[in-house]
């Protein structure tokens, strides 16, 4: 059942917001666009690729908060 699993935990509002941010990042951020297109080219579904971008954004945000740094394009 590849691509049919659903995670029910987590804050629904945060997940929705992150999904919208990931859509925008996959379209306009050059580094996230590369990640998204690479996964789609490898045969992943678009939603799976978008969830991978979401996770990459979470890791990036956590690192920036932990190091108390502002966003810079080079981090992605």
Image (cartoon, grey):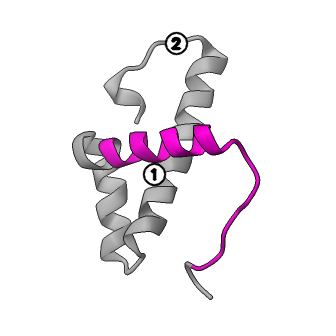
Q: Secondary structure at mark 2?
A: loop
Q: Which residue is mark 1?
A: 53
Camera-side residue: 39 or 47?
Answer: 47
How many C-alpha atoms fall within 10 Å of the one at disc 2: few (<14), some, or many (≥20)? few
Which part of the image, by quadrant, shows the C terminus? top left
Question: Which residue is depicted at the point 65% across and 75% down?
Answer: 5
Which residue appears farthest toward the front when viewing the image?
13
On the image, the x and y values in percent for residue 14 come to: 60, 37
Look at the picture and state if 42 lies above or below 15: below
Q: Is residue 5 magenta?
A: yes
Q: Which residue is mark 2?
A: 69
Look at the picture and state if 55 lies above or below 43: above
Q: Main secondary structure of the magenta part?
A: helix
Q: Are the residues tagged 2 and 1 within 8 Å (C-beta)?
A: no
Give the mark, 2 or 1, whose residue is nearer the N terminus. Answer: 1
- Is residue 68 rendered to the left or right of residue 23? right
Magenta stretch in the rendered image: 4-24
Look at the picture and state if 47 lies above or below 1: above
Q: Secondary structure at mark 1?
A: helix
Question: Which residue is depicted at the point 31% across and 42% down?
Answer: 24
Circle 2 or circle 1, nearest the eye: 1
Question: Which residue is depicted at the point 60% across and 39% down?
Answer: 13
């Amino acid at each position: 059942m590849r691509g049919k699993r659903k995670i029910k935990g987590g804050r629904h509002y945060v997940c929705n917001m992150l999904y919208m941010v990931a859509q925008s990042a996959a379209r306009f951020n050059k580094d996230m666009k590369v990640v998204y297109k690479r996964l789609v080219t490898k045969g992943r579904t678009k939603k799976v690729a978008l969830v991978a971008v979401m996770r990459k954004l979470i890791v990036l945000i956590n690192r920036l908060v932990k190091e108390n740094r502002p966003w810079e394009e080079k981090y992605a």
